Structures are given as structure tokens and as C-alpha cells.
Image (cartoon, rainbow, N blue to C red):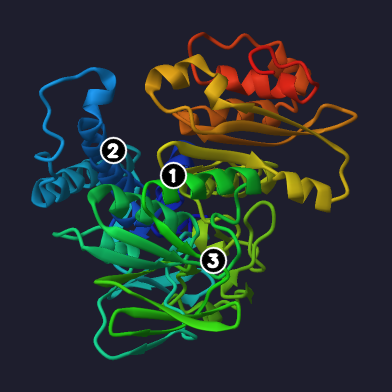
Amino acid sequence: MAGYDYDILVIGGGPGGYVAAIKAAKEGKRVCIAERAAFGGVCLNEGCIPTKTLIKTANVLHEVKEAATFAVEGVDATAVSVSMGKMQARKKNVVHSLVGGVKSLLRANTVAIMEGAASFVDAHTVEIGAKKVSFDYAIIATGSSVLMPSFIKREGENRILTSREALDIDAVPASIAIIGGGVIGIEFAYLFNRLGSTVTVVELMDKILPMVDEEVSAMAKKRLEKDGVAFHLGAKVHTVRDNAVLFQSNGQEKSVKADCVLMAVGRVPNTDGLNAEAIGLAFEKGAVVTDASLRTNVPHIYAIGDVNGKVMLAHTASHEGMVAVDSICGGNARMDYTRIPSCIYLEPEIASIGLTENQAKEQGKTVRVGTFPMAGNGKSLVEGDTDGIAKVILDAELGEILGVHLYGKHVTDMIAEIAVAMTLEATAEEIIDTIHPHPTVSEAISEAFMGAYGKAIHWV
């Protein structure tokens, strides 16, 4: 509306916020985006991108050490090492390039950029620094922060890291204890193990990666253990004292001593300083409540990404941003949280979408399950790593794809095939009838679908 400074104000410049701002600008809206820290959000600055950049270095180190396995001679595996300074410099260059790219895209799309924390004055006004900005619609995209649980006491002298500090290390710790066996904890366990640390993971649940199909998570745990990572599962941590993690397990008191402790028990929505009470926003468990179009209980205010607590993934936030803008512009887009792929960057990789086998059965569905081991895949053998599996969960009667879980080389680049198939409501038959190129790891997907009907070609 003409009476407001902007049609849409976006609060937060992460993968949800900046995508929403650009999408809105392309729809002809007058858009302003406010960011209090760094554009690109957690993903670009202290999450997805820097983590994977460090993991790339760790993987290259491992490949060099294993060069003789691939008939490469003359490499002294005991002499190779990682320059931590150069690794950090490379990480910073990657991050700087991408953050700069975000700002360039915003400017190219004539989005007004304001640096500073936005706080609601009323339902159509925020204060950013000393300036007040009015808007017709607002999209809150303030992200999340590391959870530092109050139920874990800290006593004595400790070196406790969060994911932020862990990404900036200038020396590899001789040993590290990681509290939390979710995606963040396990990726860091993998990274530090590859860099040479003695790694111990302490996890409350009886399995790691609880969002992953149990068969896949068990295989990943076995591989990590083979590489030297130790696990304490079913462990309730209550204290960190002088770099020792104290926990109860099976009724016994136990502890793990390490040079440093990484806290990786989860993340919480960022709403501090937002002054949400000024506009009466509804919250549930600290997250802003939204509907399928990302609208809050205040009709012209939307909330996307980690702040709404639904699915804390960068690509979820980006898509939510586009759905929110579509809704503001009068469209009918809605979020479907049942078809969001997730990726875990170990070696080999994990990629999943949809229901796990147990979840499907708990929902009362009659299922067909197909699996195909990567040991039967030619490209995996060529790559020198045949650990892994392709697993599909199907509706037994209709052949509907309920979930797919991949553990193997390159699978994070393959899961989008299933995301497209599920969006198009394709059936198992259509995946089987799709020609997969040879030799690729992707052939394991069609084999797993055939396996659900007892018809896999390359495995008995």
C-alpha cells in the first residue's frame, strides 16, 4: 500500500529471508530486508557451507593417505597433513564469495538492504537502529541459535565448543567428546575423526541420527566405529566438569574425558529482541506458529525457516520463503513437509526423503520394502567404497513412494530424483521404467525399487 515504506519487509537474510526478498522483488513488490549479523545466515556463515568445506579437506586428506589402494605410488601417507591455517583461509574465501553473492543478488533485484536488528514497534512498523520502517506485510526469517541446555551443569574449567567455535579451530584437538548424535554431532564426529582426533559421541537415544531409517543409521554407526569413533548410546548427560562429560547409562554413572567438548544437542528459534509481544504473535515451544502458507496468527505477518521450528533445513527455509511470497501475492501455494529431502555429509553420504520403514508401519500402512546393497553397484566398486544401501518403502497396494533412504557414494546428489518423483506422485513402476545411466551409483535406486517386488537384477 502506498502509505507504507515497503510492500514487504523481510527480517533476516539467511537462505529463507534472502530468497523470499528476491522472489518478492521479482513479483514487482517494493522490498526491504534487514539483517542484524551476516547475510547468508547460519547456513552460509556457520553451518552448511563452512562445515562441508572443512569436510572436503578432510576427505582429500583421507584420499591422499589411501592413494596406494588406487595404484598411486610415491605417496608417503605418514607425511601428509592438513595446514589448519590454509584450511580456514579456504573456508573463509568460500563463505565470503557466497555471502557477497547474496548481497549482489539482492541489489540486482533492487531490494533495499538494511543492516541491524529489527524490532516490532507495532503491527506495521519496525525499528532498525534509530530508524523506523513501515510495511504492508512482513516475513520473519530470523533463524535459530545453538541450544545450550540448562539441564547440563558446567563445573570447573571446561573447553566447551558449539558448532560455531568448532568451525574456527586452529588446531586439531587430540580428543573431543561430542554431546549429541544428531546430524550436527555426527558430521563433526566424522570431520574430527578424519582430521586425527580421538572422537567419542554421547547420545541420549539408543541410536544415532534418529531422523534416518534405522537400518541406514546402524550401517553409518558401524562404519564410523570401524574408522575409530566411539559411541555411548542411551546416555543421559548431566554435567561437564573439567572437560569430562558425566552421564548415566543403564543405571550406572560413567564419564568421558577429552581435550574439549562439543555441544550438539540441537537448535532453538531466534526471537530475542524481536518484540513479538508488540504484535501478539503466537508461539509454541519457542517457535512462531504458522499455517501451511507460513502465515502467523497475525494475518499480514509470515514466519519462515528455523524460527517456525518445523523443519530446520536451509532448503526448507528457501521454499517456505517462496510459498510465503506466493501467498502474499494472492496465490495458493502450500508447504508439504512430507517430501523434504535431507542430506548428511559423511563418507559415504546419507540422503533421505519421506517416511522410514518404522514410521510407515506405525502409521498403519501396509508396505513393501526394497533394498539394494551398494556392493552390487559397479560404480561404487570403481569408487573403492561399497558400503551402503538403497532402501525404498512403498505402499503395498498402490506402489506409492512413501520413503527412500540412500547410504552410499554421491547419494546427496541423487535424492532430488526421488523428490521430483514424489512431487509428481510417481509410482514404483515409473521409477523402474526410468532408464538410469550406467555406470552410476543411481542404478542402485531402480534396483531397490525392483527389489521391493523380488525382481532386482544385480543381486540375489
Query: Are the two marked residues, 2 and 1, in contact with CB atoms closer than 8 angstroms?
Result: no
Q: Position of residue 218 (x, y in %)?
A: 57, 48
The secondary element bearing badge 2 is classed as helix
**Could you tell whether 362 is left or right of 412 in the image?**
right
Mark number for residue 233?
3
Position of residue 344 measured from the top left corner of the image (x, y, whole percent):
47, 44
The local crowd at label 1, few if under 14, some if 14 to 19, many if 20 or more residues have their Cα within 10 Å, is many
Q: Which residue is mark 2?
A: 59
Q: Amino acid at mark 1?
A: Val
* Residue beneath the point at 50% across and 59% down: 182
Question: Does residue 273 appear left or right of residue 374 in this picture?
Answer: left
Q: Is residue 116 above or below residue 32?
A: below
**The one of 273 and 437 positioned closer to us in this rendering:** 437
Query: Dot 1 lies on which element?
Result: helix
Callout 2, which amino acid?
Asn
Give how far apart the Cα atoms at labels 3 and 2 are. 26 Å
- Kindly identify the residue that appears in the image at 28 percent across and 47 percent down: 194
Q: Picture quarter containing residue 110?
A: top left
Asked whether residue 107 is in view, the answer is no
